[in-house]
Image: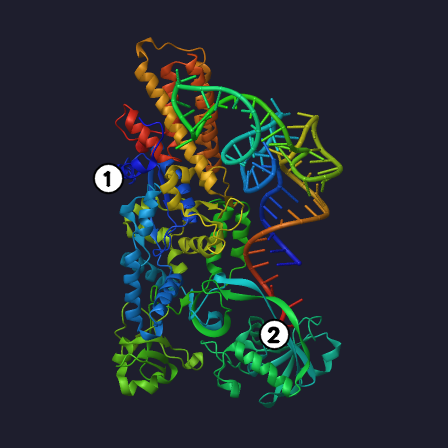
RNA sequence: GGACACGUAGCUCAGUGGUAGAGCGCUGCAUUCACAUUGCAGAUGUCGGGGGUUCGAACCCCUCCGUGUCCACCA
């Protein structure tokens, strides 16, 4: 037996032994209690980072503990198609080949991304295995597996029939680069320093950061109590602008802050969320809104000579032209405010009027709040339960339409026949060149079939809602009269992952669902509490009537040893697989969880992991000591020692403490306790006592057996290796009973 | 503006009513005897400041100071 434990030499073989032994599957003992964790599905296309290593470790600890306790334990793994992220990465790859998404029809593009993801699939799974994840791989699901997709579609249809889906035009945060809209939860806010312009506006001067949107102004607003402007309220004023003189109504609204700027605000409903709300409140006073920015981030025809310009370029030119015309009241000021940016590509998002599908969330909230009130679901994570309640009570309707191809296509069909003037399309012609415009413009030349087959995008929202083309919700193409073209938008990825506990279990069979739903623990990061956990509760309760999990365990972010966020640019990223290679999976695992607390970030550096490698070696050598003693000593002469009783008492107490800590999901403290008791009591004190023959060999060996059991969930490889080398027991440690 | 956290040894953090803990780092000594990926000994802490409750407070309450995160947001 080597003096040092060599993880590299044994980890793979041990994992194979576990896997081929079928130990990851739940036991079929009818008296066993179910214990379930649905794994948060990592992006199928991404290698694992240290955050994944953390969740795998925590979940694996709980799973191994419950398995040893004899529960029927299911850890159901999976991966996520991660719509926007994956398409974004794929488009970058296309760009390197001087291509873009516009070179392909959606079906071809989808296939290309599918193939690309296939190439990388398996990477994440293999890496999880290297960390020792004892998940039941037989139950593995990918969000785009047909048996998942069908269930996601059925949920949408159920929502639709329950009148919880609507299609409507709203202002949506839209990324002009990624080409899709978002829900508000995906928007990232960053501070931006910009110019605040002061523009002469008829009788007023107004302050604005966005002069380029003024072509779409439909009103001017002041505060109702502002004495300066009182006489103008309700009046029309003539405003001289870059494109000549126009008239605007002056309205009064509390939203205007008299203290800011000049106390006068231009109302541009289609390009500002507040202005949109003002318009809604004054819908009879303000004429129909105008759109001056399009989905490409360029000014539209109403901007006259500025049409076609990009936003920022237009802003600079417009500033100069305003100045030339003497329309700037005074020099601009520097102004700092927050703007929404695309979480993926970081460009500033444009609020644009888009017709999308929404879920009415308010009716779904009640069940989730009740689940929290009744403790059907509890949240662990430093006050995050309160944050969840805050989200639930302030929820907005959920925009589930995404203008990307990588995802589940929305099962909605439009009847194009007779509505060609209300539908715009983009598609590829016979030379694979992009054509876009009204369907009526192209259908004569190309025919419906060609257009549908080579479709990139369809937008059936031209004109008013009342005369928009009829649409039906259907998985298959409708058989009714008409020419039916399917919506090209896909679901928000979170719409499918929001059903994950339900659909993954169901897709594995009714029996599995019945037995393991609701699940026991949902373990994930606090950063996706509203975007994922909350949605799982809403949809899970809606579909099944029961909250999908009993406990939500929210882990913190893993930071570097100085507590700094890890990032490529800082160069402080720790790759968990490198660490496994260098120090072993056990060291990586316990370094991540020891002394961690739910909801609190955790600092981990290489030195931490090295220290835990020393710990795994310590375990190895303690075992060596015991078994060398056993070999050398005459076991028939093993007599009770004076410390035996104290030792056994302390051992029982330690085992009880750790059991209680794991039962209450205090994983970090459990890891710390087992570490300290093993090293600083069992090794430092008890083994020294044994050397003085104060403890019998049998007692010491029993202690080792207990500690191997207690340590196994945290450090499965080294403990299993010792077990299989020395234990007389034929059962592998992974399925050995917890405490005898 | 609102909310949620955090402030404990040089650094990173556990501990949540009963004589201050771990990892990493530091100092000295030890070492054929399980392990130098080691052991023993040691130093550095008025547990952010102040007040209160209690026989007793790092822990509960109030307040102040500092830090972080999220949400909202005034064009």
Element type at marker 1? helix
Give the Cα distance between marks 1 and 2.
64 Å
Residue A514 at x, y percent in the picture: 32, 46
Element type at marker 2? loop
The residue lying at 37 percent from left, 47 percent from top is: A38
Rendering quarter of residue B33: top left
Residue A217 in sight here:
no
Quick one: quadrant of the C terminus of chain A? top left
A184 displayed left or right of A278: left
Q: Residues within 10 Å of mark 2 (few under 14, many from 20)?
A: some
- Is residue A492 placed above or below A615 in the rendered structure? below
Extreme residue in the bottom direction: A244
Residue A527 vs residue A38, the one in the foreground: A527
Residue under pointer 2: A209
Residue A502 vs residue A437, the one in the foreground: A437
- Is residue B15 placed above or below A409 in the rendered structure? above
Have a look at marks 1 and 2 and say if they share a chain.
Answer: yes
The residue lying at 45 percent from left, 76 percent from top is: A295
N-terminal-most mark, 1 or 2: 1
Disc 1 is attached to a residue of which chain? A
Extreme residue in the left direction: A20
- Is residue A704 placed above or below A221 in the rendered structure? above
Residue A394 at x, y percent in the picture: 54, 59
The residue lying at 51 percent from left, 66 percent from top is: A341
Residue under pointer 1: A20
Disc 2 is attached to a residue of which chain? A
Quick one: quadrant of the N terminus of chain A? top left
- Is residue A726 placed above or below B70 in the rendered structure? above
Q: Residues within 10 Å of mark 1 (few under 14, many from 20)?
A: few
A48 displayed left or right of A254: left
Residue A462 at x, y percent in the picture: 42, 81
Indicate which disc residue A111 carries: none
């Amino acid at each position: 037996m080597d003096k040092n434990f060599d993880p590299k030499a044994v980890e793979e073989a041990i994992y194979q032994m576990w896997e081929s032994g079928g130990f990851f599957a739940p036991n079929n003992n009818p008296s066993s209690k179910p214990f379930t964790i649905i794994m948060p599905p990592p992006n199928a296309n991404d290698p694992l980072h240290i955050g994944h290593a953390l969740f795998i470790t925590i979940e694996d600890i709980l799973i191994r503990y419950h398995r040893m306790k004899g529960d029927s334990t299911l850890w159901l793994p999976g991966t996520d198609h991660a719509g926007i992220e994956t398409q974004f990465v794929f488009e970058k790859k296309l760009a390197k080949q001087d291509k873009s998404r516009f070179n392909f029809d959606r079906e071809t593009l989808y296939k290309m991304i599918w193939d690309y993801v296939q190439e990388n699939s398996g990477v994440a799974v293999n890496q999880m295995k290297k960390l020792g994840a004892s998940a039941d791989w037989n139950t593995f699901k990918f969000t785009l597996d047909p048996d998942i997709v069908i269930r996601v579609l059925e949920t949408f249809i159920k929502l639709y029939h329950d009148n919880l889906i609507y299609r409507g035009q709203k202002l949506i945060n839209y990324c002009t680069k990624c080409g899709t809209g978002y829900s508000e939860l995906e928007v990232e806010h960053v501070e931006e320093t910009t110019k605040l312009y002061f523009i002469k506006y008829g009788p007023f001067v107004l302050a604005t950061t966005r002069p380029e949107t003024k072509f779409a102004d439909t009103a001017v607003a002041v505060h109702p109590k502002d004495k300066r402007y009182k006489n103008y309220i309700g009046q029309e004023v003539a405003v001289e602008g870059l494109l000549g003189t126009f008239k605007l109504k002056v309205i009064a609204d509390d939203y205007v802050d008299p203290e800011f700027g000049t106390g006068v605000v231009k109302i541009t409903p289609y390009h500002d969320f507040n202005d949109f709300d003002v318009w809604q409140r004054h819908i009879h006073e303000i004429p129909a809104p105008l759109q001056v920015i399009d989905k490409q981030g360029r000014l539209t025809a109403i901007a006259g000579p500025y049409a076609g310009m990009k936003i920022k370029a237009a802003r600079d030119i417009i500033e100069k032209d305003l100045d030339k015309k003497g329309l700037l009241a005074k020099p601009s000021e520097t102004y700092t405010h927050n703007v929404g940016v695309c979480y993926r590509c970081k460009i500033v998002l444009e609020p644009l009027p888009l017709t999308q599908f929404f879920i009415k969330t308010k009716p779904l909230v009640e069940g989730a709040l009740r689940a929290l009130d009744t403790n059907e679901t509890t949240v662990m994570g430093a006050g995050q339960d309160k944050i969840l309640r805050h989200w639930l009570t302030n929820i907005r309707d959920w925009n589930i339409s995404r203008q990307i191809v990588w995802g589940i296509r929305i099962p909605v069909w439009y009847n194009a026949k007779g509505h060609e003037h209300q539908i715009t399309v983009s598609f590829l012609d016979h030379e694979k060149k992009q054509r876009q415009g009204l369907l009526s413009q192209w259908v004569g030349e190309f025919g419906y079939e060609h257009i549908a087959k080579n479709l990139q995008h369809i937008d059936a929202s031209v004109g008013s809602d009342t005369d928009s083309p009829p649409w039906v919700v259907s998985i298959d193409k409708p058989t009714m009269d008409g020419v039916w073209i399917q919506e090209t938008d896909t679901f928000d990825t979170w719409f499918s992952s929001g059903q994950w506990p339900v659909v993954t279990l169901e897709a594995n069979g009714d029996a599995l669902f019945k037995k393991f739903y609701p699940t026991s623990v949902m373990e994930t990061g606090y950063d996706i509490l509203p975007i994922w956990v909350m949605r799982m509760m809403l949809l899970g309760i809606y579909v099944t009537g029961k909250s999908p999990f009993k406990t939500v365990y929210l882990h913190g972010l893993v930071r570097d040893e100085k507590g700094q966020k890890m990032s490529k640019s800082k160069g402080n990223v720790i790759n968990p697989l490198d660490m496994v290679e260098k120090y072993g999976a056990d060291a990586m695992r316990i370094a991540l969880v020891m002394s961690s607390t739910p909801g609190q970030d955790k600092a981990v550096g290489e030195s931490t992991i090295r220290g835990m490698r020393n710990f795994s070696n310590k375990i190895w050598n303690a075992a060596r000591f015991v078994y060398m003693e056993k070999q050398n000593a005459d076991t028939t002469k093993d007599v009770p020692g004076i410390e035996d009783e104290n030792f056994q008492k302390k051992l029982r107490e330690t085992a009880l403490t750790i059991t209680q800590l794991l039962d209450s999901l205090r994983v970090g403290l459990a890891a710390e306790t087992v570490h300290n008791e093993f090293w600083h009591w069992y090794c430092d004190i008890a083994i020294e006592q044994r050397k003085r023959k104060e403890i019998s060999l049998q007692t010491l060996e029993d202690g080792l057996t207990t500690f191997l059991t207690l340590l196994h969930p945290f450090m499965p490889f080294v403990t299993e290796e010792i077990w299989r080398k020395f234990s007389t027991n034929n059962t592998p440690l992974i399925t050995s009973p917890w405490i005898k």
